[in-house]
Amino acid sequence: MRTIGLIGGMSWESTLSYYRIINQAVNDRLGGLHSARLVLYSVEFQELERLQHAGAWDEACEILVDAACALQSAGADFLAICSNTMHKVAGELQCRVGLPLLHIADATADVVNALNLRRVGLLGTRFTMEENFYRDRLKERHGLEVLSPGDDDRNTVHRIIFDELCQGQVHAASALKYKKIIERLVERGAEGVILGCTEISMLVKTTDAAVPLFDTTDIHARAVAHRAMQEVSPVSMP
């Protein structure tokens, strides 16, 4: 089994889900007392969030590069960033660290394409919804048309992520707002909606819409577990 290197803490709330899903997926496949072989570097999110909102992405990248180097030294065979937003620096990180990176947008697009969908809505932080690093990867590498919410809805989605979800707060009123935003994306032609922030699944479930909702936390974590177990045979059951 390959050793997974997780860069987490963005926020630690969603990193908990990664740890649980990865280990459960390994145990489901291999049985017995099997669990994932992994190392985790959890960053200090207050510092990183400040750099994000200041547009200091080079400094934010340095934090992740340091984390990746520590994971490499600890024996990781490949990396996963437990955040959609911080994939903004994924290319630079991979150039500087000699380990492969399992990109969250690629894992998600594989699931979307398996359903033969072509037009998807995207929820996430303002950085993920508005900038090109995520949208262009979905479009250019995977042939997806990506719809983002309108200005007011983007502000709402972003605010709830940082002011509530990243602080472990889950409010019914906010869930209703998200569901209305998803409905408006569907009205514009979205055939499915990517929950492109690893905290959103705390608030919205994949059954909360008339179209498929793609939980990037669950999808990415399961893809990480699968990568770790490639060429590992399941335990035969009596």
Image (cartoon, helix red, strand yellow):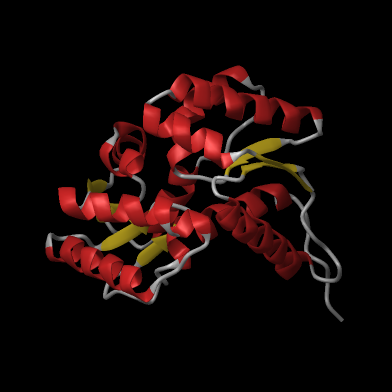
Q: Position of residue 158 (x, y in %)?
A: 33, 50
Image quarter of residue 133: top left
Residue sitting at x 54%, y 52%: 220
Q: Position of residue 11 (x, y in %)?
A: 55, 49
Q: Nearer the viewer, residue 155 or 134?
A: 155
Position of 218 relative to 94 (above/below): below
Q: Position of residue 54 (x, y in %)?
A: 38, 28
Q: Position of residue 185 (x, y in %)?
A: 19, 60
Residue sitting at x 39%, y 69%: 204
The C terminus lies in which quarter of the figure? bottom right
Q: Nearer the viewer, residue 52 or 66?
A: 52
What count of labels does the image hold?
0
Position of 194 relative to 95 (above/below): below
Specify whether residue 212 is in view: yes
Image quarter of residue 66: top right
Residue sitting at x 81%, y 33%: 74
**188 left or right, relative to 168:** left
**55 left or right, relative to 229:** left
Position of 100 relative to 168 (above/below): above
Q: Nearer the viewer, residue 153 or 97?
A: 153
